[in-house]
Image (cartoon, helix red, strand yellow):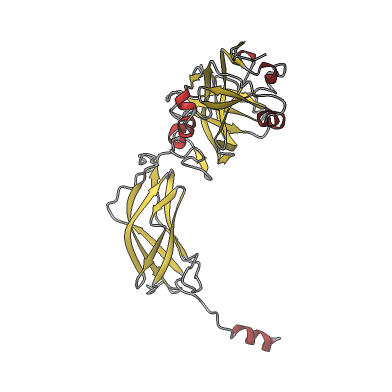
Amino acid sequence: MLALLLACSSVERNRIEPSFVHVDLATGSTLGTEAAPLPFSAVGSTFTATITTWNVDGEAYPFSGEMSLSVRPGRVSAPARITLVDGAWTGSVAVEAGFGPTRIWAADEDVTDGRSPSWSAGVSAPIWFQRPTIPEMQTTDNHESNQLEGEFAELRIGDREVVVSATDPAGFYVSDLGAAPGNFSGLYIYTFSKPPDEIVVGARLDELNGQNSEYLAATQLNFPTLHVVEGQRLSPSPAALITEAVACENNAMEAYEGSRVRVEAPVIPATFTADSTAFADYVAYGQWPLEVGACTVYAESTATVPDYYPPDHAGETLSHVEGMLKEVYGKWIFIVLDETDIGAGTRSRKGSP
C-alpha cells in the first residue's frame, strides 16, 4: 500500500498555463456606483481594459494567444475575442445592455488554433448600470428580440407607474404609463397558471423581475418575482389605434406588442370559408383573419367570446376589433378580452351572402 501511495504521489500533473487572468479597468474610468449608476443603454458604453495572465505561483506568465470576452449581465458588442502578446492586452471594450453590477469577463476557452485551453478566467470590478424600464428593455429594431433576451431581467419600475392592464388564465399584461402605447410600454408576464389574487386590472406594481424569453417572437417574463402596491389602483391606457401603415410593418407593430390595441373597420375576408387555409388555422389555433387595408392581422376570441363564430361573419366589415397584441413570428394577433372588443359587422363586399 505504501509503495502504491508513493507511486501515485510521483505522478506529475501536466498543468496548462495560464492559471489566472486579471481584468483591470483603466483608472479614472466612469464606472458608476450602486448609489449613482450609469444609465441603462442598448447603444453601449466603452471601457478601457487591461488583461494580464499569471501562473499557478502568482507570477506574470507570458501567454500569447486568443481569449474570449463576455459581459454578465449584458453583452459585448466588440471585441468578442482578443489576442494577448507576452501575457498582456489593452484595449477598448464596448458593453451593451448591462444592468446592475456588470462585469467584463476574459476566458481562455473556445480555442481556434488547435492548442489545449487552460480554462482560466478573470473578471473585472463591477461597472454599475441602472436597471432598464419596460420601454428601455423592449425598444428594438428587431421584432423577434429585445435588449435582455435570455437574461434574468431585473426591471426598474419602483419609480414608474406600472399597472396591470389585462389578465388571462396563464398570466397577465402590464403597461408602463410613463410611455404611451406605441413606445414599447407593454409586456406579458407568464405565470404558468392563474395569476396571484392581487393581480387585477389597475393594480400597480413596484417590483417585477423574471426570466426574459422570446416565445414564438413574443417577449415575456417567466417565473416572475413581483410586488403589488397595496391600495393603489390606476387606469390602464386606452386602446391604441393601429393604422394600415403600422399593421403592414413588423417593427412598427413591435412597438405595440403587449399593449391594448384597436383597429377600425377591419374586414373578415369573404374567402374565410371552410375550405380555406385560414379556416384550417382557425380550427387548429383559434385565430381568425382581419384585413386592415392591404394588411392582415388576426383575432383570437374562442376562450373569451365563445358564442362568436367568425366564419359566420365572413365578408363583413366590423366597426372595430380590440385586444392585447401578441406576435407569433410576424403574425400579429389581437387577444380579445370580452364581447365589447368585437364591433358589430355589416355586409360590405359585393357578392357576399
Q: Residue at x 66, y 35 (%)?
A: 192
Is residue 209 placed above or below 305 in the rendered structure? below
Who is closer to the viewer here, 5 or 299?
299
Residue 296 is left or right of residue 169, and the answer is left
Residue 189 is left or right of residue 305, and the answer is left
Residue positioned most to the front? 351
Is residue 97 placed above or below 52 in the rendered structure? above
Total number of numbered discs in the rendering: 0
Q: Residue at x 53, y 79 (%)?
A: 14
Q: Quadrant of residue 189?
A: top right
Who is closer to the viewer here, 22 or 134?
134
Asked if residue 199 shows in the view, the reply is: no
Q: Residue 158 at what x, y percent from top left?
A: 46, 30
Asked if residue 141 shows in the view, the reply is: yes
Image quadrant in which the N terminus is located: bottom right
Image quadrant in which the C terminus is located: top right
Q: Residue 143 at what x, y percent from top left?
A: 49, 37
Is residue 143 placed above or below 301 in the rendered structure? below
Q: Residue 293 at what x, y percent from top left?
A: 50, 22
Q: Residue at x 33, y 50 (%)?
A: 46
Residue positioned most to the left? 28
Q: Quadrant of residue 320?
A: top right
Q: Residue at x 57, y 24 (%)?
A: 324
Q: Residue 274 at what x, y percent from top left?
A: 72, 26
